[in-house]
Image (tube, rainbow, N blue to C red):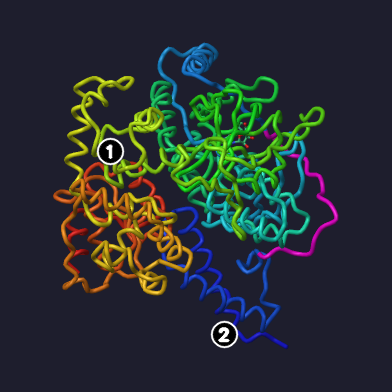
Amino acid sequence: MSIPKSSKAEAAQLRQALSEHNYHYYVLDDPLVTDQEYDRLFRRLQQLELEHPGLVTPDSPTQRVGSEPASHFESVTHEVAMLSLDNAFDEEEMLAFDRRLRDKLDRDSALAYCAEPKLDGLAVSLLYEAGELVRAATRGDGRSGENITANARTIASIPLRLIGDNLPRRIEVRGEVYMELEGFAALNRSQQQDGGKVFANPRNAAAGSLRLLDSRITASRPLTFCSYGTGLCEGVELPPGQYQQMQFLRAIGIPISRQIELLDSIDDCLDYYQRILAQRDELAFDIDGVVFKLDDIEQQREAGFVSRAPRWAIAYKFPAQEVMTRLLDVDFQVGRTGALTPVARLEPVAVGGVMVSNATLHNMDEIERKDIRIGDIVILRRAGDVIPEIVAPVIQQREGKLKRPRMPSRCPVCNSEVIQQSGQAAYRCVGGLVCAAQRKEAIKHYASRKAMDIEGLGDKLVEQMVEQGMIESVADLYHLELEQVAGLERMAEKSAQNLLQALEQTRTTSLARFIYALGIREVGEATAEALAGHFGNLEVIMDADVESLQQVEDVGPVVAENIRHFFDQQRNRDIIDQLLDQGVNWPAIDLSHRQLDQSLAGKTYVISGTLNGYSRDQAASLLKARGAKVSGSVSSKTSALIGGENPGSKLARAEALGVEVLDQAGFESLIEG
Ligand code: IVH
């Protein structure tokens, strides 16, 4: 069957459009069309190719789905060796690196460097002939690697065809294949669900995914490519600077780092390092340092190589986010609701720039799943402001028989029974407020910033007060006397006075804060606010049955049960009565004009920086009153970032993701509806 001319032309046009969209999306970071429009064009091309299989070409974007599994990887010899990098760990080593180069090049004046983040993935080489991707290989030992062409072809950010007219006859593009954090987390979730391999970190996940014999599976993995250089190049003269060469790659369709910069001196390099380090936690992917390369290619040649690394480049490493240390013991911490959480006691170690000696182990299931034993060497990870976490034990280093951590049958604090409720992972101490740990946590929560916001009543102080029997419940806070408080450790008369004053001043609060402060299981700020807004009055909430509680947004059967259970405890009712007697109060809520139009339903906003005339909580309430959600972190699902003055790193993230940014005026027009 011959292919109609019109279909041929349409397929060519679609391919052209799709490749242009890919380029705008992956290389320029500036999409031309929505994802839906892209999908529509893609499906149309798929349909045409299905109707006329003769139309399929190897560089068609529909061919990124992978192919029949291979039996093994062919070996590939690199025509130009793939080198590795020397490392620097502090400024002194960086200055020494620059000095060595200036000596070698016999230069007094500053040297220019091209700088990029050091991506934490694996190096690959992509060979393009006449603009077409003909081979992809891993770095291997630097001389030869594995032919992974079928797998590389499934990675959307690797162009199958370069763009432009003046393309090199042959060009080898080098760069890193890696996995973004969001994709990594999603992959691990689905791996865990399907009983597959759970990866320790994005790097391992990227390596494992790229080296699969079945490229159809690789196609389903969220891999990304970013180039940092070239290998061989024939048929065009590349520009004489590293930075310009990278811009050339970008112009022919190769994704390069958004953070790439040309710097005038080693001092600017040190400054660049600090800037990227400050952005580290906001980036969508792991980086483990920055790489500096002498910009002038002629100077690179002159500087030459030592063994397997160039003299003209260096990786200035960040503090490691993953380290190994020994698990000394596992203790159990009792939380506000009695839940016992295993906590790892570790041989102290620096990770992500701070000393760590404790890490959460989440729950017993996790300990079992990871097969963590007391005495193991473990991999500890601390990324950003996330609490330190044990990734996995290093089984190879396990010696002798090590004990598995065991949940105690009695509470380590109050010796009450510990039970596991059916269908729940958590173990709980049944001691309730008899348990000093639960009392302490309940009081800390009551005083916390988003609850009653009692300034000066920190965790250490609460602990002392409970231990010395000064307070049993939150209601006792309002009986505290000056001498009592001033007599506590690290308390002076002045700070005691301030605390009593803070207690006095925070007596007037809002219903939502008060409900949140009670510390009902699974009732967070959002739920507390929804309850306050729905019922308007504490007595009504306290007496509401499970059905009417479920009328409130986001309150499901479990939370409704928790609320009911909380108010069914006479002791909780007594404490609330005492608090009200002590003068805790809030303005009545007028429900008469509760129904604002819900014009922002389905939208999610992130607030950052300061807005004139609105606290962040107020701004959030105004948005929520119109049906919007307010989130703490920017993602691709964020409808807009509301950036007041000094919006900080969230602004950078929003810009990176192409999320709309609203200023004060934009915010006000939103809430005016
Ligand atoms: S340049 C001759 N630039 O780090 C220069 N490497 O430790 C060779 N890497 O094998 C590499 N980001 O896999 C360079 N911006 C970057 C990089 C980078 C990550 C990796 C690469 C290399 C390894 C060396």
Q: Amino acid at mark 1?
A: Leu
Question: What amino acid does circle 2 point to?
Answer: Ser
Mark 1 and mark 2: Cα distance apart in space: 81 Å
Residue 178 picture location, percent across and down: 60, 46
Say whether residue 44 is left or right of residue 308: left
Name the quadrant containing residue 467.
Answer: top left
Q: Is residue 6 magenta-colored?
A: no
* Residue 541 visible to an observer of this rendering: yes
Measured from the top left, where is residue 427 in percent x and y? 59, 49
Q: Main secondary structure of the magenta part?
A: loop
Q: In this rendering, does residue 229 appear at all? A: no
Is 469 drawn above or below residue 53 in the view shown? above
* Label 1 packing within 10 angstroms: few (<14), some (14-19), many (20+): some
Residues in magenta, as a range: 65-82
Q: Would you say 82 lies left or right of 624 here?
A: right
CB under 8 Å between discs 1 and 2: no
Residue 428: % across, % down: 55, 48
* Residue on which the image places disc 1: 477
Between 406 and 195, the one nearer to me in the picture: 406
- Residue 75 belongs to the span the image colors magenta: yes
Disc 2 marks which residue? Answer: 6
